[in-house]
Image: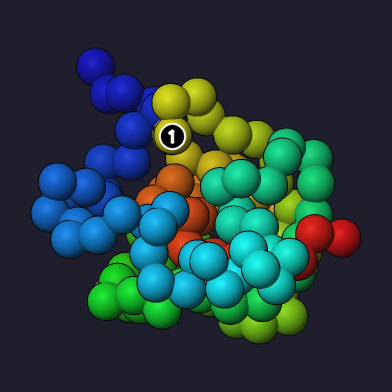
């Protein structure tokens, strides 16, 4: 049986850094930003930046058929899975299943 709270595309043991403490996270927090993984259900944000990491940016578009996370994109958190599972976001009229690891490096300004 498939675990619905786990992103099967991201192979986290092979990711070489901690998303929460990745370079850029401190500066993003100091700028008053919050990452998508932390944005509460029902709240909206405007994408401001992606953490400066060695994360494969192509992976960020491919995983869960995410939208292209570009500056100025308005996103709403529709639902969150427990235990750091996927985050369901709404962009315009479409819903996307975003891996928690990806959501953790997408920084937004709360609306």
- State the image quarter where residue 87 is shown: top right
Q: Which residue is drawn at 24% across and 17% down?
A: 1
Q: Where is residue 81 in the image (x, y as percent from the top left)?
A: 52, 29
Residue with the most extreme bottom position: 71
Q: Residue at x 26, y 50 (%)?
A: 10
Front residue of 96/15: it is 15
Q: Which colour scheme is used?
A: rainbow
The vertical placement of 25 against 84, above or below, is: below
Quarter occupied by residue 17:
bottom left
The image position of residue 64, as x and y in percent, is: 42, 54
Q: What is the residue that sits farthest to the left in this orientation?
A: 14
Work out whether residue 11 can be spotted: yes
Against 47, residue 111 (above or below) is above
Residue matched to label 1: 85
Q: Please, is residue 40 above or below residue 2 in the view?
A: below
Residue 69 can be seen in this image = no
- The correct choice, above or below, for 88 with respect to 49 in the image is above
Residue appearing at x 64%, y 50% in the figure: 89
Image spot of residue 24 (x, y percent): 47, 73
The residue nearer to you, when weighing 68 against 34, is 34
Q: Quadrant of the C terminus?
A: bottom right
The residue sitting at 50% across, 66% down in the picture is 25
Compared across the picture, whether 90 is left or right of 85 comes to right
Q: Where is residue 9 in the image (x, y as percent from the top left)?
A: 26, 49
Q: In the orientation shown, which residue stands out farthest toward the top?
A: 1
* Occupied quadrant, residue 65: bottom left
């Amino acid at each position: 049986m498939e675990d619905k709270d786990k992103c099967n595309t991201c192979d986290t043991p092979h990711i070489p850094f901690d998303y929460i403490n990745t370079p850029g996270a401190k500066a993003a927090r100091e700028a008053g930003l919050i990452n998508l993984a932390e944005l509460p259900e029902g709240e909206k944000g405007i994408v401001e930046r992606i953490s400066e990491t060695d994360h494969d940016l192509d992976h960020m578009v491919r995983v869960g058929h995410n939208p292209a996370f570009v500056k100025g994109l308005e996103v709403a958190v529709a639902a969150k899975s427990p235990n750091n599972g996927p985050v369901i976001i709404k962009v315009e009229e479409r819903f996307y299943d975003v891996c928690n690891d990806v959501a953790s490096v997408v920084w937004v300004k709360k609306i």
